[in-house]
Image (cartoon, rainbow, N blue to C red):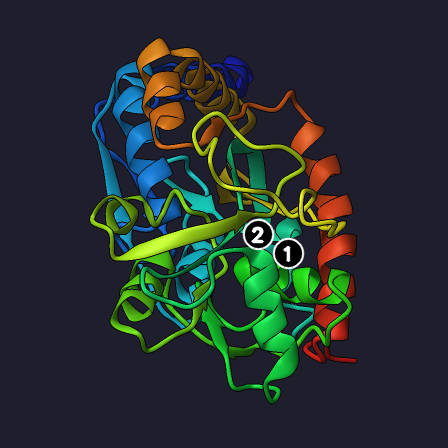
Amino acid sequence: MRAWRGPLMAAVAIFGLAQGAAAFPDGRPVTIIVPWAAGGGVDTVTRIFAEGFEKELGTPINVVNRTGGGGLTGHTFQATATPDGYTLGVASPEIAFYKSMGLGDLTPEQFDLFSRLSLIPAGVTVKADAPFNTLEDFLKAVRENPKGKFTASGTGTGGSWHIAAGGLLKAAGLEPDRLRWVPSQGGAPALQDVAAGGITAFTGSPIEAKPLLEAGKVKTIALMTASRPATFPNVPTTKEAGIDWVYENWFALVGPKGIPADRRQKIFDAAQRTMARPEIQEAMKARGITPVWDKPGEFEAYVRGFVERGNAVLKDLGLTKG
């Protein structure tokens, strides 16, 4: 009996692993961590995605906001969760810059990178009764007033919308830090501050500003794009103002590094089908969000170029360490 006991046990183990792989997610809910506040761009994209993902993966999807630390709290939770496929996250570009800013050791290499879910352009949004009706008006005021008089917000210090602001100012021939940056836990709280008059400009996406735009409390005076998107046909672009600066944010499906290959493939395939669903495409486009799904390996290559470009702006802002 001892002669065949070893092979038998090995076969049973392999069979058990195969059964476990086939069972995933076995009716257990999958949690998607959002590292920014409810109502912001990442949260909006995640909740749209989650509706279709629940159907495609065949299990309940829980969306949980974990804010704090300029997104570091939630992103760290995403990266350090048990890599069993039951905890995923939607990450924002900040994961590319925490280490270079000396905020922590978190890098894109600590995540399983599935794909971008969306591209969202940066813009310049100000209070509805602000004296700036064009980007030229705004930059003229910033240029002619003391450095730091005007403020901007939309994310934590060194976050994606901070990079958008710094790159815009540099391209316009101004110091990248001429606007004083006010850290925020996301677009939604920053926009409330803009509407209340506490902050001069929100340099994030006008998609996040849509409810306040429709309520007439804020106005978007420019988009950091090469051409006007169909969702904002009346908003001029930086290119139209003669400024060579385009900036699009991305939000991506990620997980902790080391998710078993079979589970990772199931997640990838279900997410790919989710992003192909007409109602998901339509829901994103209706909010001015460009839906995206990358081919295997494509997102990793994109991130490398994005890190290089963003770090150049962060260096100009004096925010990189070492």
Please identify the quarter of the rendering in which residue 279 is found: top left
Residue at numbered disc 1: 96
Disc 2 to disc 1: CB gap under 8 Å: yes
Q: Is residue 152 above or below residue 322?
A: above
- Crowding near the residue tagged with mark 2, few <14, some 14–19, many ≥20 C-alpha atoms within 10 Å: some
Please count the marks in the image: 2
Classify the position of the C terminus by image quarter. bottom right
Q: Alpha carbon of mark 2 to alpha carbon of mark 1: how far?
A: 6 Å
User: In the drawing, what numbered circle is on residue 82?
Assistant: none
Foreground of the two, 26 or 265: 265
Residue at numbered disc 2: 93
| One can see residue 103 in this view | no
Mark 1: secondary structure = helix
Left or right side of 39 for 163: right
Foreground of the two, 263 or 269: 269
The x and y percentages for residue 16 are 39, 19
Q: Is residue 128 above or below residue 59?
A: below
| One can see residue 199 in this view | yes
- Crowding near the residue tagged with mark 1, few <14, some 14–19, many ≥20 C-alpha atoms within 10 Å: many
Left or right side of 8 for 261: right
Left or right side of 227 for 49: left
The residue that appears at 43% across and 29% down in the rendered structure is 231
